[in-house]
Amino acid sequence: MNSDFESDIEDDCPVLVQSISNDLITRYNVQFNFDRIYSKSILDEVVVSEKLKYSCICGGFFIKKNGQITDPDIYIFTGSNFVPTEAFLNMFLNEKFRSAQFKQLGTIAPQAVLASKSIQLSSGKAANVYFTYVNFSKSPNHRIQLVNTYDLECCKIVYSYSKNIIECSDWFQNGGNLISENRTPTNEFLDKYKEKGFRFENNYFKPESNLILRINAI
């Protein structure tokens, strides 16, 4: 592993915090899934033990839809090899997930992603695995780089296996535009999160109370 590898993604997202505005729960009825034990168990199932410290879960998994937990997006840092083979990437996964077909390998992939595959967990729930060159386990700045690949601020949440903590964009605490600067999410994607409770006038979240909740204590 090249732990000193630096990503070329701009880190224009503000800081990561471990707290959210209580307004999201009481005013907007957003239902969160901040179960670190459950997040850890997913990564334990999917990633080989010696690579777990290079794994995390990001995105909308931490926000329930109609009271139900959604599919996790698993990210694995694989080093600075920009032309990885299937055999190399499969070394990061436990045996039962290696036969699943790769997507995007050798093609133009989304920002920060070298390849991906869809898998099914033992619970029957689906999961997406993304192999990335962003070394998010190295520092908060690197985790910001990873979550900042999402178009919506409400997706900027990350559970880090190595630290066993959940962090999120300070948007959850301080408010601001739901849509990240210079991003144009599809209406379908935006509507998905409006259904989860992120319905704000002009897509701008403005907390009215000063009550803050610590997400790693919920």
Image (cartoon, rainbow, N blue to C red):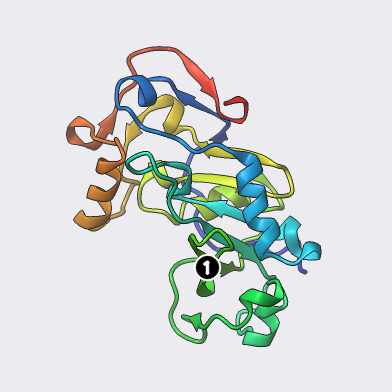
| Residue 141 in view | no
Along the viewing direction, whichever of 208 and 9 lies nearer the viewer: 208
**For the C terminus, which image quadrant?**
top right
Which residue type does callout 1 highlight?
Gln
Q: Residue furthest top?
A: 210
All told, the count of numbered labels is 1
Residue 28 relative to residue 91: left or right: left
| Residue in view at x 68 percent, y 86 percent | 87
Q: Circle 1 sits on which residue? A: 120
**Camera-side residue: 187 or 144?**
187
| Viewer-proximal residue among 157 and 102 | 102
Q: Quadrant of the N terminus?
A: bottom right
Residue at the far front: name it: 123
Point 56% across, 60% down: residue: 74
x and y percentages locating residue 63 in the rendered image: 42, 41
- Mark 1 nearby-residue class (10 Å; few <14, some 14–19, many ≥20): some
Q: Quadrant of residue 80?
A: bottom right
Residue 166: horizontal and vertical position, in percent? 60, 39
Q: Position of residue 210 (x, y in %)?
A: 43, 12
